[in-house]
Amino acid sequence: MIGKLFSCLCALAAATIACAAERPNFILFLVDDLGWQDTSVPFWSQTTPLNKRYRTANLEELARRGMKFTNAYASAPVCTPTRTSIMTGKAPARTHITYWTLNKDTDTSRPREDIAAPDWAVNGLQPGEHQTLAQILSDGGYRTIHVGKAHFGAHDTPGGDPANLGFDVNIAGHASGGPASYYGREHFTLAGRQGKRPHESKSVWDIPGLDKYHGHDVYLTEALAIEACEAIRDAVDAGEPFYMNFAPYAVHTPIMGNRKYEPNYPDLDEKERAYASMIETCDAALGALVTTLEETGQLDDTIIIFSSDNGGLSAHARGAAPDGLTRHTHNAPLRSGKGSAYEGGTRVPTIIVWPGMTDASPSRQGADSCDIPIISHDFFPTIIALAGLQADVGPDMDGRDLTPLLTGRAEQFDSARILGWNQPHQWGASGPGIWPFTSIRRGDWKLIYFHAGRRFELYNLADDIGETHDLAMEMPDKVHELAQVMDAWIDQTGAQLSIDRKTGRPVERPGESARVWLDLHGGDAQTSGNDRGGIGG
């Protein structure tokens, strides 16, 4: 059914495209670890101190031309699952790529005494396992270009190289999720960063393919932007439409400032000054790409999607947030950050520009916005549809074509669908909500099932975007209702739950745990902030 519906939507989008640009180009500008509040563009109902902290003028201009999605989510609270979901159109729960990858056949989950990760896809996305967005576009006549962070598959596996996943051009993409160094003078290597001769030793974090910048005073994001602009010109000169996956390693750790922009933030501490400069460098890269599109006559023929692969880092490595704290509040008003089940872990800034459609009105003042929840794996069917291509995606595609939302036909979009997340892993850092979990959002309701302790938290996001008031004890019937919905989502996607070390079997399903919890506690259970039991956290 989904496959047939997708084919119909592709045909409808193709007809719409005929009135706009033929064979549009695409740039997916996917920043790493960029939080919902990490730009000067407000994605909430009000401007926050964080919006005033950062300088992203090019993104502001993008917002004026595009549609701003205020309820946009990453497919996961960490990188690899989201990145591979965009490539497949499938939820990480379905592909079992539910955590970040690094070395072949290696589980990167942090060990726990009570529960363990299931037998997940530790090698990430591999050729032939799933139809990839890049391969479909390449087969459809697009020049597919990857620039920057890939992190699709593990080292020493075919999926570690984007060229094996459908990209015709790969610039600096490999299997690691962060750079050894952001500085060309350090050869973008760990040895260089440690003050050694850059080639004295090798690290999995060393950035490949940028030798021409070694020894030069150039920032990694700037080097990637230079290469991306050249790749755009090459595609235009060849007369080929292009899809570019531009994924700067920034703002992933290590937090290393760009001294070109650090003076713009004199009131911030050293760490936050560096972080802000990394964001401004990404914004400058966006500006460089847009300028190249203008110079090559492609601006009106290029659809741009701007987003992030997960929520902003807040559990470690940061300086002071506006409230003076150095942990867990850098995404305020959202709770927590990267790696967490809470909104700070998955809600991300997202803008889509479709020339002639999102900027059709000459009298537009500011950005159009959409508050219908969307998720990263929606980009797959959206791009395929806007490219006018047909794809036999089968019944297991979780993403939905966003074209109706971009063209003012929201009534044709399934805005009541269930969004789900599944991370049966313990992330390396600690903090609120950073525990193995499954969660769903239906309408304004969000239910979180923490696998350790088999406990639930319930929030109404319309009233409580910061997830400060857990309603699980007050509304046990709603918990039970949504636990059944979560069970159905688990069945639909094949989501894996954590393994109970005592039994060697998966932890109880949400529906079962909800029934037991209601029988045992009813409305009298005490809340607890401990992740080993109780309701709360």
Image (cartoon, rainbow, N blue to C red):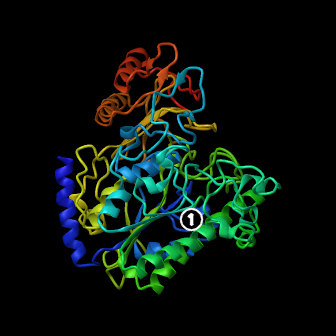
**Residue 15 against residue 446 in the figure, above or below:** below
> Which quarter of the rendered picture does the C terminus lie within?
top right
Residue 307 in percent (x, y) is at 47, 60
> Residue 404: image x %, image y %?
25, 63
Q: Is residue 116 above or below residue 369?
A: above
Near-viewer residue (508 or 472): 508
Q: Nearer the viewer, residue 463 or 183?
A: 183
Q: Nearer the viewer, residue 404 or 224?
A: 224
* Label 1: how many Cα within 10 Å (few below 14, some 14–19, many 20+): many
Tell me if 493 is positioned left or right of 412 in this view: right
Element carrying mark 1: loop
Write down the residue under mark 1: 39
- At 55% from the left and 46% from the top, the residue drawn is 335
Number of numbered discs present? 1
Image coordinates for residue 18, horizontal then vertical, percent: 22, 76
Residue 362 in the image: x percent, y percent?
A: 35, 85
Q: Is residue 222 above or below residue 477?
A: below
Residue placed furthest toward the right:
195
| 486 lies above or below 410 | above
Quadrant of res 277: bottom right
User: Which residue does the image show at 47% across and 55% down from the upper left?
Assistant: 162
Q: Amino acid at mark 1?
A: Thr
In screen coordinates, is 107 left or right of 518? Answer: right
State whether residue 465 appears in this view.
no
Q: Nearer the viewer, residue 132 or 356?
A: 132
Q: Residue at x 47, y 16 (%)?
A: 504
Residue 123 showing in the rendered view: yes
Residue name at image x 22 percent, y 62 percent: 10
